[in-house]
Image (tube, rainbow, N blue to C red):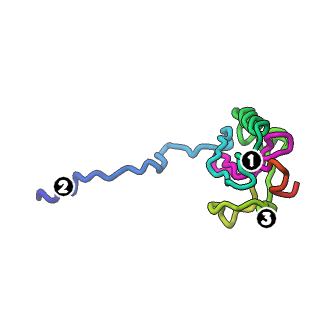
Amino acid sequence: MARQKSINKQKIPKNKNRLKVNEQIPNYDDMPPIFSLEKVIGDDYCFTKLDDTNKKQFAESIYKRRDIKWSEIKKINKHKLGTEQIPKHQIKGKMPNNIKDDTNYFLAFRYNGKKSMVGYRDKNIFYIIWFDHNFTLYDH
């Protein structure tokens, strides 16, 4: 009998990743992007290859986008604050290991004139992989 009591009193850990009954999945298109440098590759297209002017322009470009929702960004001109799709096969830089085989394209945001930061979106986070500071990462 005592053994049965101890089994009944065991606590089952709660899974914090599960949705609650009335909880809605967030609409990430209604959120502004969060820009992440976590996935930048340390090669010819690394942040460290940018001069001070390009680093400043990068900071200003993400600051300007801080309140613009993804749904709005999709409608904005690619040479302004919008984005464009770059086919995966056009990328000439080193491909990160975490990119899935079924990935067909990357996104490019302009940060200084036509110079672009290229990466991918996951939910509302834009992971930057490359900085195309010299227009050689893909065919423009």
Which residue lies at the image location 76% right of the left edge and 37% below the top edge? 52
**Along the line of sight, the residue nearer the viewer: 23 or 71:** 71
Amino acid type, callout 1:
Lys
> How many other residues sit within 10 Å of disc 1, few (<14), some (14-19) or many (≥20)?
some
Q: Which residue is mark 3?
A: 89
Tell me if residue 5 is in the magenta stretch.
no
Q: Which residue is mark 1?
A: 49
Which residue lies at the image location 86% right of the left edge and 44% below the top edge? 114
**What span is in magenta?**
107-132
How far apart are the two marked residues, 3 and 2, measured between alpha carbons? 59 Å
Q: Do labels 3 and 2 touch, CB within 8 Å?
A: no
Q: Position of residue 73 (x, y in %)?
A: 76, 41
Q: Quadrant of residue 71?
A: top right
> How many other residues sit within 10 Å of disc 2, few (<14), some (14-19) or many (≥20)?
few
Q: Nearer the viewer, mark 2 or mark 1?
A: 1
Q: The N terminus appears in which quarter of the rendering?
A: bottom left
Q: Is 138 situated above or below 65?
A: below
Amino acid type, callout 3:
His
Q: Is residue 8 left or right of residue 134?
A: left
Q: Position of residue 72 (x, y in %)?
A: 76, 39
Q: Is residue 135 left or right of residue 101?
A: right
How far apart are the two marked residues, 2 and 1, measured between alpha carbons? 61 Å
Q: Which residue is mark 2?
A: 6
| Mark 3 or mark 1, earlier in chain | 1
Tell me if residue 131 is in the magenta stretch.
yes
